[in-house]
Image (cartoon, rainbow, N blue to C red):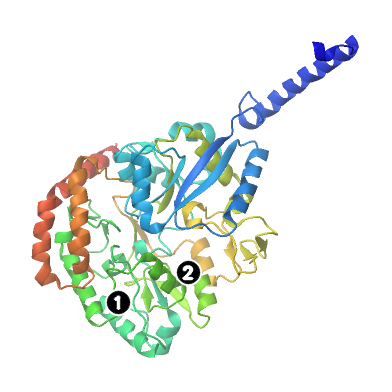
Amino acid sequence: MKKLWGIPACLVVAMLFTFLMACSNTGNNNEGSSGNATSNNQEEVLPVRYVVPGTAKPFLDDVVKIVNEKLIADGVNVKLEINYIPWDAWDQKTNLMLSTGEEFELLHVMENGTVPVGSYVGRGALQPLDELIDQYGQDLKKIIPDYAWEGAKINGKIYSIPAVWRFETSGSGEMGTVGYRQDLLDKAGVAFPQTADEFISAAEAMRKVADKNLYIQTEADGSPNFLHRTYDSWPFYVDYRDSIVKVDQDGNVTSWLESEEFKKDAEFFRKLYEKKLINPDILTYKKEERDKVVSMGDFLFTTNAALYASLAISKNNPTAVVAENYLASEKPLLQFFAFGNTNAVPITAKHPEASIKFLNWLYSNKDNHNLFLYGEEGTHYNKVGDRTIEFIDDENDENYYFDSWMIGNINYMLFDANTPEAHLKAQSVEPTNPVEFSPVLGFRLNTEPIAVEYANVLSVVKSSIIPIKMGVVPYDKHFPAALESLKAAGLDKVVAEYQKQFKEWQATQNK
């Protein structure tokens, strides 16, 4: 009261009344916007440390600063921080972070990567999100379709927030899309291939008319689903990455590596390798090298989403015309996962609600979404249409964007004004091909019961099977010894456990 000495009593009363009214108004306003009784100034600002693969884009810090300012202004008391981990260290570093209990709030997960959500859940590394979504994710529920939420469930609980940034059956090498140089195909005077033999013949013809030595670009550790479409047994499911089991449309689980189809794969790629139609260094070819080649348009065919790289190709190789199609195009497409990319909350996060609040804010409207993905309009880009923009380059021809495949939503996404029409169509119009759904859609294998065997089998696959699959060594000569190693590593136990879990999961789906 010493500080009020000498102030008239009436003025003291007025000051106290004004202070109490201000407190009352602040509490009411905050309750209306966020449901909390405390003001935004008093509420703790929680971190959202988002761990993602790759390298940071130019101006990331500038955009994150603007995003954080808008989050606070919108009454969402969280602070975003992006932590990039290089591709070649991704699995090792993220596994270390989780195993050592490092605290962070949001983890990007690639369902077609080496560690899908099911594997993380099996080791107890992720938090279930159902209650948090109910409490903080009303806009998430609206923007993400039901089929994606169903696909995000493991043992009946949601463990990640799907990034529905594309139609999964279009523009996706995992689903069997083949990108190709349309200009070279036309110049060679051949039609787009439908069979495996036609594919090889077309590649040879395109190579002859190209002005440089080009290859068929594909991933050594990815299942060639584009080729599987040509087999009489199609459609069937083979995991794009681990490629251990085969599941047919009747739900029968068998060993993929012991199948006739796998043998056909190896014989097909042996032909490509002997004809020098794939890179002779395919086993040591790094992802960054392959991505660079694709972005230059320096390929005959590619399984790496040519249309997604079409903008870079148009800049780097203006004479190249790229397109996408399917072998055996009259056959149905097979959808075996609901989404390819998703974002999860680690078990180490002490405030998991912060991530849900951030994602709910992000997907609540296109302004928030596009601010994070493309930056500030007028500073980082200018709109030139409903879905197209012109990025603003700096003096080094660099511009900001955040990779949409990690967190984008197809309802909001914007595209460079120079993006070819074919890519815009693929991103905004559902494919017209008939689609069959695999019985594994929504199933996640828990690898914990077979952790040792699973790791050992994958080790043998990497050392002995991939050279056979890619045709670097002949199947007949090397497969018997590789199969013996697989059996010793625990292949039969892995297949049996997959079958057991899958049947149990199917039983719950039919109730």
- Look at the numbered disc 1 and give the secondary structure of its residue: loop
Q: Residue at x 29, y 50 (%)?
A: 440
Q: Residue at x 19, y 65 (%)?
A: 262
Count of numbered marks: 2
In this view, the residue in front, 503 or 370, is 370
Q: Is residue 98 above or below residue 377?
A: above
Residue type highlighted by circle 1: Ile
Q: Is residue 426 above or below residue 269?
A: above
Neighbour tally class for label 2: few under 14, some 14-19, many 20 plus, Cα within 10 Å = some
Residue under label 2, please give it: 309
- Look at the numbered disc 2 and give the secondary structure of its residue: helix
Query: Residue 278: which numbered mark, if any?
Result: 1
Asked whether, in this view, residue 97 is left or right of residue 492, the answer is right
The location of residue 119, given as percent across then percent down, is 30, 45
Task: Tell me if residue 117 can be seen.
Answer: no
| Quadrant housing residue 447 | top left
Neighbour tally class for label 1: few under 14, some 14-19, many 20 plus, Cα within 10 Å = many
